[in-house]
Each structure stands twice: as C-alpha cells, then as structure tokens.
C-alpha cells in the first residue's frame, strides 16, 4: 500500500483498523476499515418511546372495556323497556294495536322520584321526608335494581348517591341514564356523602343536574326536588 499523497510505500498493515502516519510526507491516513466502522449505540429516545406506546395501549384497552360495559348496559335497558310493551301473559300485541315499546311511562299526572342510596339511614330519612311532602317515591339500594325500576316506570327526578357501592357505581348509573335516549331528559340530583364542591362540578365533572349534600338534610333535598317539579 502506497501513500495517496507522496506515493511512499507504507508496507504491509499489521492492523488495518487504525490510523497510520506516512514516513515520507507525515500525513495521517485512515484505513478503509476504520473509516467505514460506525459505533453501534441504541437511540436514547427508544426507551421513552416504548414506554409511551405501552401507556397508550393500556389507555385504549381501558376505554374499550368501558365502551363494552356501557353497550351491554344499554342492551339490558332496551330489553327491559321492550318487555313493558308486551301483553300480560307473554303474548305480543297485534300489529294494529301495538304499544310503542319505548314510550315514557309515568304514574298518572303526579310527578314521582326514584331514590338510589346504599345508606339505609339516609335513604329512609329521605323517603320519609318525600312522603311527608306527598311526593311519590321509589327507593333502591343499588344501581341494578334502580335501572330496572326506571325501565318499569319512568320517574320525573332521579336522586342518586354518587358514592354508591356495589356492581354499578354512581357514575355508571349516570352514564347509563344519559346514554339512554328515553331517559336523557330526567334531571339527576346528587344526594351524596362525597365532596362535590358546587353545582358546576356536579354538572361538568359528574354529569348530574343538581347537588344537595347529605349534610344539608332531607328537607333541603325535598325543597330542591319541588323546585325542579315547578320548573318542568
């Protein structure tokens, strides 16, 4: 091998992976192998990118589960509503006299309330106060029973404990009601032990229409319900 500048012979290279110095002109020469060799280091951004992808996958999976649960609940609600359009004894009505299966049903002209509260003491106190005010009320201790009751007879107001225990949480009950076209117009009043700061939080964060803290007492709840009746 000769120097590309002065053509001085460089001799045989014992180690091709290095920089050599020409004895004739003093030039420092990089051998072909050294010139083409590149460091192989992992991209520093690869680990954060992998973490971000994993986080996105978990978020999407949680969203899919929530949508599936909501869809299953809607199907159950529709089945309950459709069953109300069938004749007693199991037979369907004739085509000419079929009852609309999803029509709102209310008890006469009197406005009624569905109360959903898993605390027996506050539930009974609210029921007693509502009956004292001559307001028809049906009380339920869990979300599943309440959904069946609403499908059986649509109320004018729903009163709900946001911190409901059981298979269906308070937020799930609200989502189910707001996702059902026949129920979306029913006002929801939060009668709750949870710390909801104000009416704005009740509406924007929790999807309800009103908030009455349990600390205010059942009399305040009845007063709010009567005001809703007057507005509607």
Image (cartoon, rainbow, N blue to C red):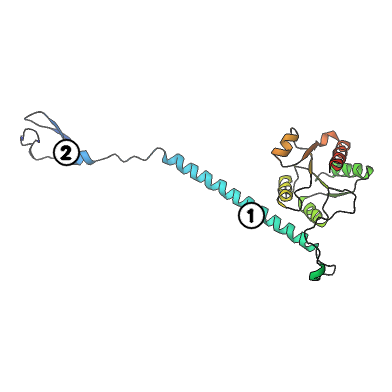
Q: Residues within 10 Å of mark 1 (few under 14, many from 20)?
A: few
**Left or right: where 109 falls relative to 167:** right
- At 80% across and 57% down in the image, what residue appears? 103
- Name above or below for residue 191 compared with residue 62: above
Q: Is residue 157 visible?
A: yes
The numbered disc on residue 31 is 2
Relative horizontal placement of residue 100, taking residue 32 as reference (left or right): right
Looking at the rendering, which quadrant does residue 82 occupy? bottom right
**Location of residue 121 by image quarter:** top right
Which residue is identified by label 1? 68
Kindly tell me whether residue 92 is visible in this rendering. no
- Locate residue 39, reporting x and y percent: 29, 39
Left or right of residue 219: residue 82:
left
Locate residue 106: give its quadrant: bottom right
167 left or right of 44? right
Q: Tags 2 and 1 in contact by the CB under 8 Å rule?
A: no
Q: Residue at x 57, y 46 (%)?
A: 59
For this rendering, which residue is in front, 1 or 150? 150
Picture coordinates of residue 174 (x, y %)?
Answer: 73, 46
């Amino acid at each position: 091998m000769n120097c590309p500048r002065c053509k001085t012979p460089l001799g045989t290279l014992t180690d091709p992976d290095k920089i050599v110095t020409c004895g004739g002109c003093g030039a420092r020469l990089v051998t072909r192998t050294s010139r083409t060799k590149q460091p192989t280091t992992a991209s520093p951004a690869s680990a954060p990118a992998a973490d971000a992808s994993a986080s996105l996958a978990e978020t999407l999976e949680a969203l899919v589960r929530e949508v599936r649960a909501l869809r299953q609940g809607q199907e159950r609600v529709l089945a309950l509503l459709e069953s109300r359009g069938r004749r007693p004894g199991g037979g369907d009505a004739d085509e000419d006299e079929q009852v609309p299966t999803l029509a709102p049903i209310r008890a006469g002209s009197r406005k009624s309330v569905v109360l959903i509260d898993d605390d027996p003491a506050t539930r009974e106190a609210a029921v007693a106060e509502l009956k004292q005010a001559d307001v028809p009320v049906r009380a339920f201790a869990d979300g599943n029973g309440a959904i069946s009751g609403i499908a059986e007879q649509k109320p004018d107001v729903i009163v709900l404990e946001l911190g409901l225990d059981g298979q269906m949480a308070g937020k799930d009950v609200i989502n189910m009601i707001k996702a059902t076209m026949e129920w979306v117009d029913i006002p929801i009043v939060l009668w709750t032990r949870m710390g909801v700061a104000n009416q704005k939080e009740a509406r924007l964060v929790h999807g309800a229409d009103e908030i009455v803290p349990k600390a205010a007492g059942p009399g305040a709840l009845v007063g709010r319900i009567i005001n809703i009746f007057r507005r509607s």
